[in-house]
Structures are given as C-alpha cells and as structure tokens.
Image (cartoon, grey):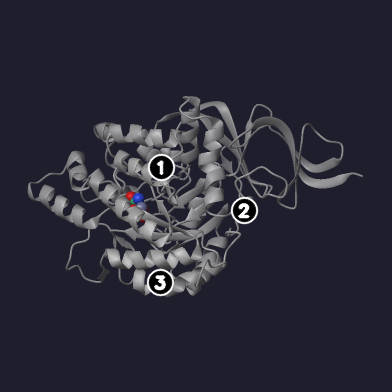
Amino acid sequence: MMVKCDLCIKNGTIVTGSDTFQSSIYVKDEKILAITAAEDETYEAEETIDAKGLHVLPGLIDTHVHSRDPGPTHKEDFYHSTRAAAAGGITTLFEMPNTTPPVDNETHFALQKDNLSSKAAVDFGLWGICLGHLNNEKLPALHKQGVIGFKFFWGYAVHEETFQLMYNYKPGMEKVIPPFHDGEVYEMMEHVAKTGQIFAVHAENNDLIQTLTDRVEKRGGRSYEDLLEGRPSLTEFLTVQTGIAMARATGVRFHVLHVSSGDSVEIIRQAQREGLPVTVETCPHYLFLSAEQYDEIGSTMKVYPPVKYKKDQEAIWEGILDGTISSVCSDHAPHTSSEKDGELWSIPAGMCGVETLAPLMLNAVSEKRITLNRFVQLLSEEPARMYGIAPQKGTIHPGSDADFTFVDMEMEDKIDINKLHSKSKVSAYHNFPVKGWPVRTIVRGKTVMDKGSVTAESAGCLVTPAAKGDMLYE
Ligand code: NCD
Ligand code: ZN
C-alpha cells in the first residue's frame, strides 16, 4: 500500500552526532515518518527536494538569544531575530528572559508566548528569569508552563521598573535592584533544584569588577587591555567556583553561560570529573576573536563577559575538543550601530550572532578543527538533550520534528554585515571568509530559508521540555 506523505528529501548525506550516511527522509504532518536507504516505492511524496551534494543535519538550536521583545525593540525584535535565525540555519532558538516585562511569572510567560508566537519564523523555547525573593515562589509555575531553564544574571543590577540589565552598577544608583548576594543565589538554586531544570548563569563577580574598574578609571585607562584589567578572568572564575560549590550543596544542575576564560573551563572540567551536574557553553566570539585582535576589529567586539586573550581561546578550544564544553550558541545581543559607535568604555556590550553562529562553526569544520559530527553535537544534539526537548528536536529519527539544516560544505563566501536580517547590523565578523554555509532551513517540514532567502511565514511554535511540571520534590 502506498503511504502518502508531504515531503521527501533525497540524495542528501545525513549527518548526526555519531553517523554520516546516505538516505532518503520522508516527512508527514510536520514529523519524520521514515528514513530509508534509497527512494522507497512505499512512499509517495507531494514535494521532493534533491539534496545532492549537500549535508542534511538535524535542525540547529541556538540556546542563547536576546531578541529584546518586548522591551528595547529599537535594537532588535522577534520578527527580525527569528528571520536572522532562519537565514543562519537555526530551526529553534531559546529566548532570554531579560525583556520588559521579564519572564518572571505565569502571566508574563503566557504574554510572552503569545507575543513571540505571532512573530516567530522558527520554533522557540523560553528561558525563565531568577529574581531571588522577588520570584522564587513563581518558579514551579514557570516550570509547569514549560520554561526551557532558569537564567540568573549573576553580578548584574536590574532596573526596578523595566528589569533591563544595568551594565555599570554603582551603589547608590536609583531605581535599581542591586546585584543579589550569595545567600539569595543559594536560595534560588534550592528552588530551581526542585524543578530538576537547569540553573544557568552569566558568571561575573560584580564586587571585583567594581573595585578593579574603579582603579583603572581613576588612572584614566580606556583601552581594551584596561577593560580586561577591570573585568579579568578572575571575575568569571570566582563566580563559577562559587556556583560549583553551591551546586554541590543544593544538587542543582548548574550551567555556565558563554564561558570566556581558560581558568573557568579548567575548574568546570574538574567539577565534571567529580561527577557534579555542571555544564558549560561558549560562543563564536570566544573561539574566533581575542584581545590581541582588538586594534584590527574595534569596539564591535565588546561583549560581556569580555573576549579574553589568545591563551584563553586555546583553552576554550581544548574544552570543545575534550567534551567539557557541550554546546556553542550565539549570545545574540544586538544594539544599534549608533549605540555601538562610541568610546569603548561607554558603549553597550553585545553584538549580533544568531545568523553567523552556524557559518562560523562550519568554517571551523572546514578548517578541520572539529568534525561535522561534533558540530551536530554542539549545535543540535546536546542542546536538545540538555534542555529536555529531545527526541522532538536535535535528532533525525522517525517521530521527531522534521527540522533540518542543509549545509553546503563547498560554498565559500564572506560574512557581510549589510546582508544580516537583524534590525541591527553590528557584528565583529564583517568580511570574515567562511567555507561551509547553511543553504536551506526546514522547520517542521516547511522551508523557511532557501539559498539565503528567508521565505518564512510567522509559524514558529513554542517548544517545551517533555518533563515539564514534574517536580523532583516539593
Ligand atoms: C547581553 C545583552 O546585551 O543583553 N550582553 C552581552 O554582552 N552579552 C547581556 C548579557 O548576556 O550579559
Ligand atoms: Zn550574559
């Protein structure tokens, strides 16, 4: 009997985290129906895509995106960031909760789900925010609704009304919630531990940053090296170290976001050896940029935590290779070009990244720094597993969502910031040569990008962990 399906992808080379093979894939009702050695007479497809010469990967996941929607949408919004994602081969992104309002309770989660669903070109998960005593009691409800994990901006003050992050907090500032002290962080971890979900932190120690930055400012330091003197690796290391110790005590799954220094990678490696539930991600800027290049690149590369030195970059690569680092994401954090076009000291930190994440990492595959299988682990399989959305996402398997990223490993082009789909076009990678590009993005069986053109309607859906609502203990 002939089985009718919606889509057949033939002649492509399928790549998973562990295998590379030739197959045909059949899709029905947004899911993978079958994977067969060759075209199979059992199936009849309405549409067939010939992927000859291309690699077919499980849809890529960017776990760290700040679309700022609702909030400072003059910098970016979800309409733009999800089209940038589609253009960059991303089929699912996780949206950060530092919006206005933030995703801090049940009502705001529901509002955000509706807001983003109306604009999404790709699927998305929602991070919940930890605001200590202000929302500890709301975390179980957020867990039930299906947040992807809980984020804590360790060391940041937030504005009392907008909940926007305050970059250079000083005591005495008005209308701010000052950075939370360690006791409060400990309590947050206890609360998150009950949900069994990830407690993910921006790791920078604010006390040390204040003291060291004051010192640098007083002597008039304004260079990139001065910036790093005010925010050295030690600020990250101290926070990671405290976090690991508290994770050991509370049992929480502790995740270090956007790791930037070699010392932090090493202490995380040790914690993992000890068997602690500690994970870590990094971003392209820590893998492809270093302080030594500042004169050449300029202030577009200002991000927090700041990009450190070449020796840190090398240590972070080591962490990718030995498995200490389990995922690579963008930390897409756009600001307008005029906001970024100023003195290093005063401009905001962050740059676009969701569209350049996959090309930059594919280029690393072309340079043989990692294999294409490892690439799939870092950008799809591991994120899906860690955040509990596998096997719906992150795998090419019957029953899974029909999300695919086609890549052309022979294609060579330069990154051109003018072609970015984000509202802001700020990136440190203008003219960066890349070999290996995403050429088609398919979300639940629908093509949302083909050869660089974004064809998406707004049909992205919220993705929630399979185990949402199952509390480990009350
Ligand atoms: C982020 C932003 O602008 O939202 N900036 C950044 O440099 N990474 C905030 C953050 O993650 O620290
Ligand atoms: Zn951060």
Horizontal arrangement in the rendering, residue 345 relative to residue 269 (left or right): left
Measured in 3D between alpha carbons, the distance from the residue under mark 1 to the one under mark 2, in whole angstroms, is 29 Å
Quick one: which residue is furthest to the left in this view? Answer: 219
Decide which of 378, 470 is in the foreground and name it. Answer: 470
The residue at 49%/74% (across/down) is 107
The image position of residue 190, as x and y in percent, is 40, 66
In x, y percent, where is residue 399?
Answer: 72, 50
Disc 2: which residue: 457
Front position in the image: 162 or 343: 162
Which of the numbered marks, if any, corresponds to residue 376? none
Is residue 411 shown to the viewer in this render?
Answer: yes
Is 150 in front, or is 448?
Answer: 150
347 w.r.t. 316: above or below: below
- Position of 215 with respect to 146 (left or right) is left
**Which badge, 3 or 2, comes first in the chain's sequence?**
3
Label 3 and label 2: CA atoms lie apart by 37 Å
Tally of numbered discs: 3
Element marked by disc 3: helix
Q: Which residue is mark 3?
A: 136
For residue 283, the mark is 1
Q: Nearer the viewer, mark 1 or mark 2?
A: 1
Q: Residue at x 16, y 51 (%)?
A: 213
Instruction: Count neighbours of disc 3 (C-alpha within 10 A) and say few if under 14, some if 14 to 19, many if 20 or more.
Output: many
